[in-house]
Amino acid sequence: MTEKMTRRRFLKVALGGTLGLGAVGIGGSAYATRIEPYALEIVHLTVPLPGLDPAFDGLTIAHISDIHLGAWMTQAQMESLIERINSLGADVVAATGDFVSRLWAQTPGEITASLRGLTAREGLYAVLGNHDHWTDPDTVGAAVTAAGFALLNNAHSVIRRGGAALYVLGVDDVWERKHNLGHALDGVPEDAATILLAHEPDFADHVAQTRRIGLQLSGHSHGGQVRLPVKGALILPRLGQKYDMGLYTVSPAEGPADNTPLRLYVNRGLGMTAPYVRFNCPPEVTLITL
């Protein structure tokens, strides 16, 4: 991780800042460690997708990211979150990586057991993140696949309604240079409606240059976990510093003006990495309506 400040400095500023603000009337550190990390927010978003056939108008995607099971996140916590996600009744579930922070002997089984409860009429799709690669991508990928997800490692899948098609693509981790967008696009029609899953959001600048993707879903940044007024995120990872949270429009940097720029959504994630605090940046599930 490329940090804007040291981790010790981060803790001092984050917890000291929240104490100074008196978050919701209780000790700031208690709020940041015991309240907000559990305060799941369901973000509702409507996104126009270029080339979308009317057959898919209103299709919903539950976007989740950065579970980081095996550290702060437990299987029991995750199973409770699964119930909330299923209650949204999404057509598709898209998971954009970092399923684990570390890999204990029981972790693969916990990944499969907790994620297996997810339901979606049109399918479950996933890509891996940098932490998955830093542990064991083969083991993590097998556990995710066993839970019923289609793991899109530089590949695509097609959702069909009658004669209409919607393409869901995924690239393997960008930080670890395992990505190959060309392979993912191979066989996808030029004018197709496309959604790309890519763990690292700053990859969007490259994606926009292709003029082939309508919507990119990413995670990775956790929104910074701690965001202070005016300043914003205190610390952000490499490849998650330009686009750190929420919805963006990304136009190609070169070539002719583009009437259909890439839309990028960056999810704040469900879990955390150390230090295990959140302030002004709650965990998130995004319900996207096309």
Image (tube, grey):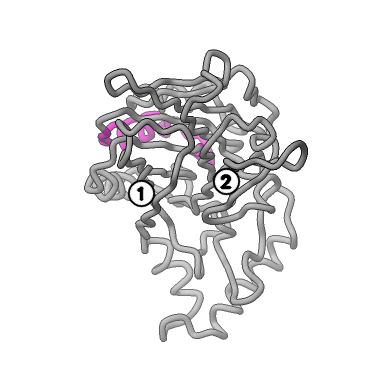
Query: Depth check: 73 or 165 in front?
Result: 165
Mark number for residue 220? 2
Q: Is residue 239 above or below residue 165?
A: below
Q: Position of residue 264 (x, y in %)?
A: 55, 46
Tell me which residue sits at (44%, 44%) in the image.
48
Q: Main secondary structure of the magenta part?
A: loop
Residue type for callout 1: Leu
Tell me the element at label 2: loop
**Part of the protein shown in magenta:** 97-120
- Check the picture and name the quadrant holding the C terminus: top left
Marked residue nearer the N-terminal end (1 or 2): 2
Tell me the element at label 1: strand
Tell me which residue sits at (59%, 76%) in the image.
229
Tell me which residue sits at (50%, 70%) in the image.
280
Circle 1 is placed at which residue position? 287
Q: Residues within 10 Å of mark 1 (few under 14, many from 20)?
A: many
Q: Is residue 247 above or below residue 135?
A: below
Query: Depth check: 88 or 128 in front?
Result: 88
Compute the Cα span from label 1 to label 2.
Answer: 18 Å
Query: Depth check: 218 or 12 in front?
Result: 218
Which of the 4 quarters of the picture holds residue 163? Answer: top left
Tell me which residue sits at (49%, 50%) in the image.
267
Q: Is residue 271 left or right of residue 90?
A: right
